[in-house]
Image (cartoon, grey):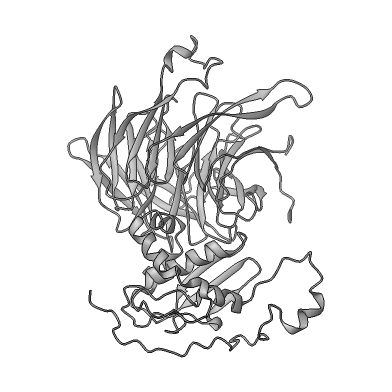
Amino acid sequence: MEAYNPNPTVYKSAKTIRKSGAKEGSLWLVEDEENIEDSDEVEPLDQDEIFDLIRSITDPEHKHMTLEDLMVVSAPQIRVGSNLVDVEFTPTVPHCGMSTLIGLSIRVRLLRSLPQRFKVDIHVKPGSHQSEHAINKQLNDKERVAAALENPALLSAVEDCLASAGLRGERLE
Amino acid sequence: MDVDLPANVECVAELQGHDDRAWHTAWNPTKPILASCSADKTVRLYHYGRNDDEPDPGSISFKHVNTIQTGHTKTVRAIAWSPSGRTLATASFDANIGIWEREGAEEEEDEDGNPSHTVHSGEWECMSLLEGHETECKSVAYSSSGNLLASCSRDKTVWVWEVHPDSDFECMGVMMEHSQDVKQVAWHPTEEILASASYDDTIKLYIDDPSEDWFCFATLTGHASTVWSLAFSPNGRYLASCSDDLTIRIWERVEQYKWECVEVIEGVHERSIYSIAWGTGEGRKGEDSLGWLASTGGDGKINVFEFHAPPTTSETSGTRPPPSHHLLARVTSAHGVHDVNSVSWCPRQGLRNILSTAGDDGIVKVWKITPPKES
């Protein structure tokens, strides 16, 4: 198979940098600390936690690298509302034929990890892909996603990408 | 509830049992049966009846009577009853259409054609499997006469099948008009006009040319994203469509073969609108009533609108005002945090204020709309 991007730029995986500015190691912003006992509140999620869930997904073309290594995903590209998560990702090249698979892997990872109340929107960074509209539309069509996940070959490809997702920033071997 | 709405909505049944997302429901037009289908590849059938006993006379109760293990190898996306109520069609992501009938069904009906008390007995059998679509089937629908069946698929095609005796089906036409998946097909309530909604953002209308084949006579454009669902008004003069663009559009038949958008309803849903259904409604209605339109979608809301025909101002040539509508009732979080995938009105006399919904929670819910007694 011809590579879409044979020589991708690899970025240093920066596990310790909290890209959103939230305190390292804390699930809570500093000002929230005194409210931790308030357990009636629905537990908030922040962009770093969402990033942590998807950073170690394997890139389908460069199987020794993660989406974080290739800067396909990053914490600042994630927005979290009370019941909404919006993930933007950046294909490594504008003609990347793997973009749908990457987006599908992100969707499935979040589907399996997040509380059910979250609606998830996924899109490529504006201007980053020549088929931007088509990719976005497909990734956010629940019927297409449902059908894709009943396709054994596609599901297997997604599972391959997700096998490493649990590393959450630890290095791939 | 944030606003005072004229009608009261009550959840009268919560039907659990599907092991996965529930996609669609269909009310049998002649018998007290509600069917639902799911990603779990089954169809569940419920028998319902009015309770005439105290303490709640007039209430409706539902009882699960049958689960059809369809044999479809993938999600059963949509179902449709024939107008006779004898046949159920299933549309599956496995690209096939299943045709189901209940063994010994005829013997168990009394002289008036009403089901006997053994309505729930007898196995449902697959009488026919319609193959032809290349990829996922997404919708199936019987014409009002029951003589035609339409199906559509991600393969971009719409098929029209003629229904012959003994569950024999003949393909009368394959329309390859859409440039993307076809999400739903719907028949006009009285004429053999077929409508299809697509991922290509358009709606197409088809008729049979007696000397040729089925052909597309109109393409309705205006939606800015996927058109998920279609519903003709009970009088056949209007067509409603709903979309991922968060709008509902009302199209009017202005000439025999010409349909125009006369209304765009915005701001009533916050996420993709997956389904609409247009019924006559029940109870007090003026002669100008066009019935009740229900919509639902990814925001978990159900909206019910009442439509009225525009005043027929004589002498005014040209533009006719659109039908008026107002929100009759609303349910928020109808299936908790989950998407609602479809909405259907009960078509049976005296129960046309009852609707069913299917959700991502795998649950089917039944709702009763009670309008005010006085206006």
In percent of width and height, residue B277 lies at 51, 43
In the rendered view, would you say A109 is above or below B129?
Answer: below
Instruction: State how many labels appear.
Output: 0
In percent of width and height, residue A134 lies at 37, 68
Q: Quadrant of the C terminus of chain A?
A: bottom left
Q: Quadrant of the N terminus of chain A?
A: bottom left
Report the front residue among B38 and B182.
B38
Question: From the viewer's perspective, is B244 left or right of B361?
Answer: left
Report the front residue among B54 and B249.
B54
In the rendered view, would you say A82 is above or below B335?
Answer: below
Question: From the viewer's perspective, is B287 left or right of A37?
Answer: left
Q: Which quadrant of the view contains residue B288?
A: top right
Question: From the viewer's perspective, is A122 left or right of B135?
Answer: right
In percent of width and height, residue B143 lies at 37, 34
Identify the residue at the far left of this view: B211
Residue B84 can be seen, yes or no: no
Identify the residue at the far front of this view: A173
Q: Which quadrant of the view contains residue B13?
A: top right
In the rendered view, would you say B330 is above or below B83?
Answer: below
Residue A32 can be seen, yes or no: yes
Report the front residue among B287 and B291.
B291
Q: Residue at x 50, y 49 (%)?
A: B275
Question: From the viewer's perspective, is B220 left or right of B38?
Answer: left
In the rendered view, would you say A172 is above or below B189?
Answer: below
Q: Residue at x 55, y 83 (%)?
A: A76
In percent of width and height, residue A135 lies at 38, 69
Report the front residue among A62 and B165.
A62
